[in-house]
Amino acid sequence: MNSIKESQNPLLQALTSRHLIWRGGTGLGQKTRPTGLPQLDHKLGGGLPAQGVIDVRSLKGIGELRLFLPSLSEAQGSGRLCVFISPPWQLYAEGLAGAGLDLAQVLVVRPGTDAESLWAAEQSLKSGACHAVILWQDSMTLHQARRLQLAAQQGQAQLVLLRSSEAPSLPASLCLQLTAHSRGLMVNVLKRRGGWPVREFLLDLRNHWPELTLNSDTRRRRTADKAQTL
Amino acid sequence: MNLWLYLHFPALQLDSLLQEHTAQPLAVLDTQRNVLVQVNALAIERGVEVGMDLATAAALCRDLQWVPYKEALESQKLQEIARWLYDLSADIVLYPPDGLLLKVSSMLNFYAGLMPYWLSVQTLLNALPYRYHYATGYTPLAAQLLAKAGECHISEDAQKLKQRYAACSIEHTDLAPKYLEPLRRVGIVRVADLLSIPLKELSRRFPLEVTHYIGHLSGELSQPLEFHHPPEQFQQYLELLYEITDLQVLQGPLKRQLSLLEMFLRRREQVCTRLQLRLHQRNAASLEITVGSAQGEYQAHKWLELAQLTLGKCQLTSPVYALTLRVEQFQEKAGQSVDLFTGPQGQHTSQQLVSVLQARLGPERVTGLSRGDDFRPERASIDCPALTPSEPAIQNAPLLRPTFLLPAPRALAEPVAIIHGPERIDTGWWDQAEQVRDYYIAHNQAGQWYWLFRTPGSNHSVPQWFVHGYFS
């Protein structure tokens, strides 16, 4: 529809060709990767950006990594690596394999310092040998984030930056704030490049992670206490 | 008769010093005789000559720098040159410390003539930083004599060659000085004077060494030769002209060594996966550095990049005066395939990326992840060398497992709600690490999902709760 209208309207055509019109959503023509969650894909206009920095701020352990596993496992078809840098604890092979990741294409890097983490992330991103880098690092300057963004574009890779919820905002292709919810995750899209603002919404994960949501039907709650013997 | 080519390197030690950026007169001094044996162009400009003593030279040129002559070093350099030439010519004889003899006749069929052969040898020699004189001859000594006399001429014409070497002064022969003096006294100045005397006559009038020399020179006596067989490894020693304290400055000399390695590997269609670099330090033990590449590389710039990363971690305690590069194992170069449609998307392959990361961070910090065939959570996930192909683990019923495991279980210290469980893991009775645990999935008030376990109570212990993982 749009294209027909445009071709009929010379003024619109002239404006478009001179980049005087900016279009939300379609304007930047960003490539996206489906997340495997139709609801999230719809809200994000097709999925996660395939290149660039995705800044995720959340409490650790509420399911923030699980959110990305389906798209990571999908992207492994290209044969490129998926690099995990400075995970806060030990990555558990069974958990990742259970989510569909091919462990042969997983690289775990545990640098000693923040500077080394950034270096490793930049090298991996611009090498072109990885499709995604998952980095856990709270402290990052604007300048560093911009460098990583450039490296990601150079190597056509995605950087998922997992940070604590209090961390300050950074220039990124997508900024998400995640909070725990009994039926899934509350997602607040703080920034999306080339997209309309989205109101905070509840991402219903009851179908995808039935065991890790509080589904009222299968609810079996028992309160455990250290002193109490079951 | 066989045709031979002799290469004489008049200033092997001087040329082997790194003098790309030096703009000062330089000489090599034979400290025993106190005579300059090699001088560079800048020193010659100032009037310094080979054969001068140090005092005269210093008087002519105040800022003359000199290094002591080392025969062992020259012999080593000669071996290196022989190794390069071995790729072009089959039979090589070493004449330490500064000469090489190549058997030409056996190579003529392959190269279809003397000139093509010489051109390829010359191309190689010109790529090396050494000055050389060359000559051909129908006996090894004839070629040597001409080369040492400073001849730079290639010819197949036996008559002309004989005229040329006959015209040489006897000083250029290999005869010891003590034989030369008596010869000079009886008026023998040129080799031709000796050649005109029949061998029998010669042996009566002069020492046996002179007779042998002339016999070998003219080809009347045959001379035993021992051909050189190059070692199967690459080792290159480079002495620096100045001491280096900053590792950044080391790049230049290192690059030169690596490009030699590249040339070596390229000729053999091989790659290597590991370099050993030894930095000789002035007042401390030499520093041994190993640089590895998972994929195998031959290109100098790739190795330089990896070496820089490794060197970045090192600390020099004392100035470096020399470096040795050594490679012991080689691999055949394997073809690397890239996707035809997507093409190479960056500058590195996965293996190269792993090498780069490991070079800077250390191999233990860059690993892969694989499943262990064990039910105990600590052993179900193991670090393996990076890029290990994953073997399909024994298929269990799909179990819900966390994405993170704590390095050590932590006692539970907050109220949680248990959502699933228990799942009993009771195994390991065979290897002294028996585990009996009931695992639960729970979530806390902040919304974090835990993987908990409880040790079952028994007569002498109270059951305890531990956090073991996160469903992050």
Image: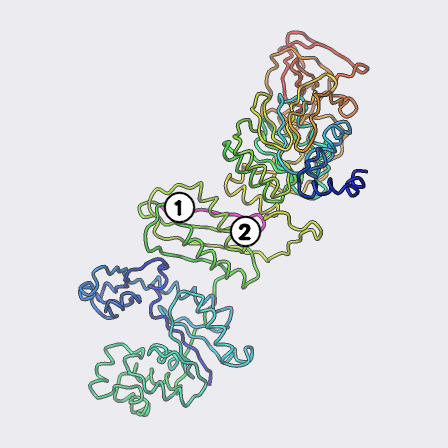
The residue located at (73%, 39%) in the rendering is A12
In the drawing, what numbered circle is on residue B273? 2
N-terminal-most mark, 2 or 1: 1
Q: Quadrant of the C terminus of chain B?
A: top right
Q: Amino acid at mark 2?
A: Thr
The residue located at (49%, 32%) in the rendering is A113
Element under disc 2: strand
Query: Which residue corresponds to mark 1?
Result: B247
Count of numbered marks: 2
Q: Quadrant of residue A42?
A: top right
Decide: few, some or many residues near mark 1? Use Cα within 10 Å; few <14, some 14-19, many ≥20: some
Q: Amino acid at mark 1?
A: Leu
The residue located at (37%, 73%) in the rendering is B8
**Is A210 or A39 nearer to us in this picture?**
A39
Which span is picked out in magenta? B285-297
Q: Is residue B272 above or below residue B8?
A: above
Where does the image place residue B106, in percent across and percent down from the top left? 51, 79
Work out whether disc 2 and disc 1 sit on a shared chain: yes
- In reply to whether residue B286 is colored magenta, the answer given is yes
- Outermost residue on the front side: it is A11
- Outermost residue on the top side: it is A228
Where does the image place residue B417, in percent across and percent down from the top left? 70, 12
